[in-house]
Image (cartoon, coloured by chain):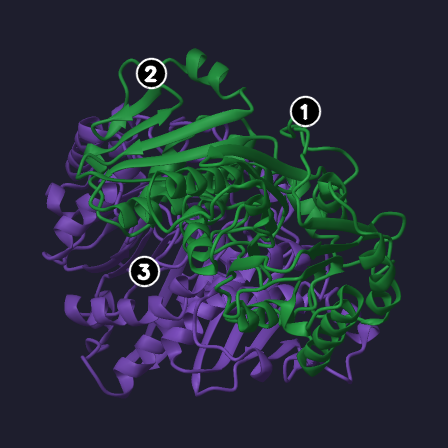
Chain colours: A purple, B green
Amino acid sequence: MAGKVSPLAPTSYPEMPEIEGVRIATAEAGIRYKGRTDLLFVGFDEGTTVAGVFTRSRCASAPVEWNRARLGKGQARALVVNSGNANAFTGMKGRSSTTATARAAADAARCTPDEVFLASTGVIGEPLDPAPFERHLTQLSGSAGPGRFMDAARAIMTTDTYPKVATRTIEVEGGSVTLNGIAKGAGMIAPDMATMLSFVFTDASVPQETLQACLVEAVRGSFNSITIDSDTSTSDTLMAFATGTSERRGVAAIPASGPVFNAFQEALADICLELAHQVVRDGEGATKFVEVKVTGAVSDESARRIARSIADSPLVKTAVAGQDANWGRVVMAVGKAGEPAERDQLAIFFGEHRVAVDGERDPAYSEEAVSAYMKNSDLLIAVDLGMGSGAAVLWTCDLTDEYVAINADYRS
Amino acid sequence: MAGKVSPLAPTSYPEMPEIEGVRIATAEAGIRYKGRTDLLFVGFDEGTTVAGVFTRSRCASAPVEWNRARLGKGQARALVVNSGNANAFTGMKGRSSTTATARAAADAARCTPDEVFLASTGVIGEPLDPAPFERHLTQLSGSAGPGRFMDAARAIMTTDTYPKVATRTIEVEGGSVTLNGIAKGAGMIAPDMATMLSFVFTDASVPQETLQACLVEAVRGSFNSITIDSDTSTSDTLMAFATGTSERRGVAAIPASGPVFNAFQEALADICLELAHQVVRDGEGATKFVEVKVTGAVSDESARRIARSIADSPLVKTAVAGQDANWGRVVMAVGKAGEPAERDQLAIFFGEHRVAVDGERDPAYSEEAVSAYMKNSDLLIAVDLGMGSGAAVLWTCDLTDEYVAINADYRS
C-alpha cells in the first residue's frame, strides 16, 4: 500500500448498511503483507444467486477460471478473497491451491466447493500456499457477522491508498432493497476490466439470469470505461450476490423487465460507476481525474476507440500531470487511433474552453483561462469530430513520476 | 534538448563521407530554440530521385501532406527541415506556411516548388511563421556544401540528446556507392512511424519506383518495429534521395532485382535499422534498450501484436526500469493482446534465462542470475507461445520518471 492517500480520494464515506444474508469476517493471514488484513470471507444464506464478469485476458488466473466454471450453477454460499498474491500464472500448483482453498472454505461454510467463489489479487507468478487459508477459514466462517463492509474493502486492497465502497437503497414493490459494493484497484487497470476486483451484495431476490444481465449491462459504462495504464490484468473480477432475504420482508423478486427491474438495473449501474470512478481516483500516482468525451464520430464504437487512444496516451497523460492544456497531443492521439477523422473538422475542448476548431487553434483561445482550468483536480477533455453522431465517454487519470516510482519497485 | 546525454548513446560516431550531389547548410533561425541550429537545407543535383514513407496518422501535418502530393513526380532538388515547430494542426495557416516555405526554397535553390520537400518537428498546433525561412534560405542555398552530415543531424534534433547518423558503402558493378542516413526522434514514437524524421542520401542511381520499393521494405523491420511510448505522431517522415552521381564514375544504375539490387536493399535496411535503434536508445528518459521477441505464435501478425502489447505496456516498461525481471507482467501483456495464447504453453525468457515455462515459474529459476542479467543496459525479453511458427521482433526502452518529467513540462 502506498504511504499517502491519493489527493483525489473521497472526503467522506457513506454509512454502509447491513445486508441480510451477508456475513463478513476478515483476518491477517500474512499471505504476503504484514500488519494488515489480507483475507476476506463472506458467507451467504442459502438461496443466494450469483453473477459475474471477468477479465478477457487470454492468460486468466486460476481463481477466474474456477469462478467461470461454477457460474452456470448460479448459487453461492461463500466468497473468499485474498490480497498480496494473485495466484496467476501458477500452473498446476495454482489450480491445486484454488481447489484446496475452495475445499477449506466449503468445509468451513458447510457448503459444497461448487458454491464457493474465489478471488486473488497481488503479485503474479508466485505460487499461492493454501495453508493460511486452511488455518483461518473455519474461524472466519464462525465469526462472520452482519455489516463490516469497510473491513471487507480494506482486506482486499493492494496498492490502493483508500478503501472503496458504495451503497444504494431503492424502493420497490413491498419495501426497499439495498445494494452495497466494494472494489479495489490502482494499477494494471484498463477496460475489459483491470485488477480490479469488485463485489456487489444485495438483499434483493434476483434470479441468476436477471442478475447476470444486469451486471453485464452495468459493467459496460463503468468498469469497462476506465483505464489507468491500459494494462488489462489477468485477474479482473466483478461479481454480484443477491441473497433474496428481502422476500421475507414481503419484497417481491426483481422481474426480468419493467419499472422495478429498471430501478434495480440503474442502482447497480450507479454503484458500479461510483466504484469505477473511485478506482480511477486511486490510480497509482494519480493527481488528476480525467473524463474523456468523444462526440461526432462515425459510430459509438469508433468514438470509443478514439477515446481510448486519448485516455491511454502517455503524452496526453503526462501533459495533464503538468497541468498543460496540450491539445496538440490530443490531436496526435485522435490521429493515432486510426479511426475516420478529418483534421480540419476537429474541435477540442478542455472543460468548456474550446481550444481548437476547424483544424487550428481557436481564435478566442485564452492561455490564461485554460491554464487556470487545468489546475482543477477533475478535468474534462472533449473532442468533437464533426462526422456523425457516435459518442463515448471514458475516465482515466494522469501519468506521473509516482506511477513510475511505484511500479519500478513493485515486486519486492 | 535534454541536459544530459542518454546513457545508451553510442560511444563513437562514424566518419560520414561526402555524397556527391548532396550539399548541406544549417542555420540558427530562432524558430523556437535559441542558441542552436534549427534549420537544415539540403540541395540536390538535377536528376535526384526521391522516395518517402509517412505517418499513417489520420491527422497528418501540413508538410507531410505537401510531400505526399509531390512524391509521384519523384524528383527532388531541395529538402528543408526545421525543428521546434511541427507545423501540425495549423489549418489554413499551416498550409500557407508550407507553400511559402517551399516557394522560398525553390527561389533559393533555383528549382520549382514541386521539387522541394519539407519536414517540421516540434510543437504541434502553433502557427509556423515562414519569415525565418525566407530570411535564411537564399544564404543557406548559396553556402551549402559537401559533407556536413553531423551538422544536419544536429539541426533537426528536438528532445534528442545526441545526433543520429549511419553510413554504409557497398561495392557494386563499376565501383562503390555510399548511403548516409540521419534521424531524429525521442518522444511520440511508435510503429507506423513516429516523430521521427529520417533522411537517407545516396550517390547511387536509383529509379524512383525501385527506391520507393526499397524504402517500404526497409521501414518494415526498422522504424515500424520500434516504439518508445506508443504515441504515433502526426509528422513521421522517412525519405530517401538518390543523386545518381555515381553514374559519372561508371557505376550502373541499381536495377529492380538481382544481386546488386539486393545489396542496395540490404544496405538501406541496415542503415534504417541502425538509426531506428539509435532513436530507441534516445527515448525520453530511457536507461534500457529492450528487444522484444515473440515466437511460436499462430502467425507473424499475431506475434507482432503480442510483441507490441509487451513493448507498449507501462507495467512491463517500469519493471525494466526497476531492473526487475517481472515476468508476471509479461504474462499480463501477452494476455492483454487478445491474440491466441495458451497460458500453460508459454515460455518466457530474459536474455537466455528461461524464467517461466508450462504455465508457471521455471523450476531452474535463479533470482540471482536473472537479477544480475537485468543490470545490463541492453536486454532481451523473449516469449514463445508454443502454438505455431509466427514470429516478430520489436525494440523499445523502459519507462522512467524522467520520461514523465520531460513530458509534463514540454510545451514551454
**Number of other residues with Cα within 10 Å of mark 3, as a class: few under 14, some 14 to 19, many 20 or more:** many
Q: Quadrant of the N terminus of chain B?
A: top right
Label 2 sits on residue: B365
Q: Amino acid at mark 2?
A: Tyr
Q: Quadrant of the C terminus of chain B?
A: bottom right
Callouts 2 and 1 in the same chain: yes
Q: CA distance from mark 2 to mark 1?
A: 37 Å
Q: Chain of mark 2?
A: B
Label 3 sits on residue: A201
Asked if labels 3 and 1 touch by Cβ distance under 8 angstroms, the answer is no
Residue A231, image x, y percentages? 43, 49
Q: Can residue A384 be seen from the camera position used here?
A: yes
Label 1 sits on residue: B12
Q: CA distance from mark 1 to mark 3?
A: 64 Å
Callouts 1 and 3 in the same chain: no
The residue at the point 24 percent across, 73 percent down is A249
